[in-house]
Amino acid sequence: MMASQKSQAEKRMNSFFSPSRPGPKPWPNRKKQTNKSAICLCSVSLLAVLFLSVFFITYSEIPKSIFSISSAFSGSVEFPQCRSETLSRTLIGQRFLLYAPHSGFSNQLSEFKNAVLMAMILNRTLVVPPVLDHHAVALGSCPKFRVLSPSEVRVSVWNHSVELLRSGRYVSMGDVVDISSLVSSSAVRVIDFRYFASLLCGVDLETLCSGELAEQSQAYESLRQCGYLLSGVRGNVDGCLYGVDDDCRTTVWTYRNGGSDGRLDSFQADEKLKKKKKITYVRRRRDVYKALGRGSEAESAAILAFGSLFTAPYKGSELYIDIKKSSSVPEVKSLIEKVEFLPFVREVMSAGKRFATGTIKAPFLCAQLRLLDGQFKNHQESTFTGLNQKLESLSLKNPGLVHVFVMTDLPESNWTGTYLGDLAMNSTKFKLHFLREEDEVIVRTEKELASAAHGQKFGSIPMSLDSIKKMQKHCSPRKVSNVQLYVEEAVCSCASLGFVGTAGSTIADSVEMMRKFNACSS
């Protein structure tokens, strides 16, 4: 971690409790004061009332999960979870790898794949995280060297995970993505986050998943302490936690990549950015096994906690992880091939196929149009241009009606005046199909995913019969988010007339990967 990052993270957390708000204005002086003592007393009383009002209003606006973890930041804190007898009983001699996913589902899936690689290389059991709400946690921008520190991301992910549990919306990545091939082949060891948190924090699974965590209860206090521990804001705990504080601003992780360990990466902040942000550090390529594996300071820690594990190609390099070139290592090469494509679970794929064959009932083109979020809202015209060119080409080859399945973040009510609106009006040449959250296929799939609970079936640490029953009875979600997105991607994988995606969208990349591996026909 760069100098002062931990103090910045702590200040960020503490800022929830001491917001920088202007104080009440001084009581105006009066020219005639008959009783200065009485007026002074009255002033003090009013100031006290104003202060208390501001405090309680501010308190009510603070997310409770964040308040709970942050309130532990003052004074010294002991972690009962890290006592030797607790570790030996709870963690059963295993070593774990945690990370902090963020942003949308496609980004989170990409991070999960990287986490699988890291866990195998470092010989650790991967804690399978929940699927976070879209952009509930945002990292920032690696190319602009503007990101949250790893400890800040870890705190945010912990808070959101607890909130998902309390609201009955917790869905594991293993509930949505089929990881059976990874686990059955022993390519990686895994444990569900809920079971891990229950063991480490000493919170019964029934209590953890019930959504009835009272803020003054012992269970809530235990979760608060666990979150504080795993965030690593106050540093590492010998033999228990090692927080990886090297992020994309300073590090590109490699593995057995020749003699590149410690060398400067090809992508660095330019001079203008260095001056603007006062950047004095450089980005170096580091071998992850040498830094965090056998013989390293991190090796003895029961829990190795990363921040973000997102990476992407950028200006001839990678933003954070460059391990896929390690094809000379047979085990790594094999796992890279396995994680390149991880399909949705059968409930999602079956729903996509049903919609394609039962509702569209014809060859169709899929158009993935991301128009509102971030950078994409400024490129609507170019996005529509690509779709128009594809449709003109199809119209020449297919004189009849062209069916188009549309997945977009632009609400149907806002299509008027756009190219989508024009297509919808041109019913003699094009027939548009799309999904809504309330559609039967989405509602049915949501229920099937909640009932199947695939994520509860995988784990390298044996669960007691009592724990299994509690997971099955209490930990199934009451609400599954993002189902429309999952099914839309499955439908697009079945588009026989082709696919038009939004440039730079990770959703488009995901659909392209599904089509490459013939997910619809497999």
Image (cartoon, grey):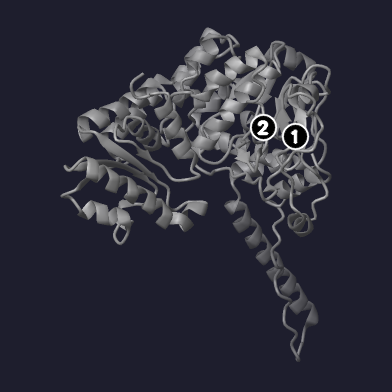
Give the residue at x 74% y 76%.
26
**Which sits earlier in the primary sequence, circle 2 or circle 1?**
1
**SS of the residue at dot 2?**
loop
Disc 2 crowd, CA 10 A, few/some/many (<14, 14-19, 20+): many
Give the foreground label among 2 and 1: 2
Where is residue 234 drawn, in percent x and y? 79, 37
Give the residue at x 33% y 28%.
445
Amino acid beneath label 2: Ile
Looking at the image, can residue 432 be seen?
A: no
Q: Establish if 487 lies above or below 88.
A: below
Quadrant of the rendering where the C terminus is positioned: top left
Amino acid beneath label 1: Gly
Where is residue 399 drawn, in percent x and y? 17, 43
Give the residue pinned by disc 1.
Answer: 232
- 291 or 227: which is nearer to us? 291
Image quarter for residue 393? Answer: top left
Number of numbered labels in the structure image: 2
Disc 1 crowd, CA 10 A, few/some/many (<14, 14-19, 20+): many
Q: Establish if 348 lies above or below 429.
A: above
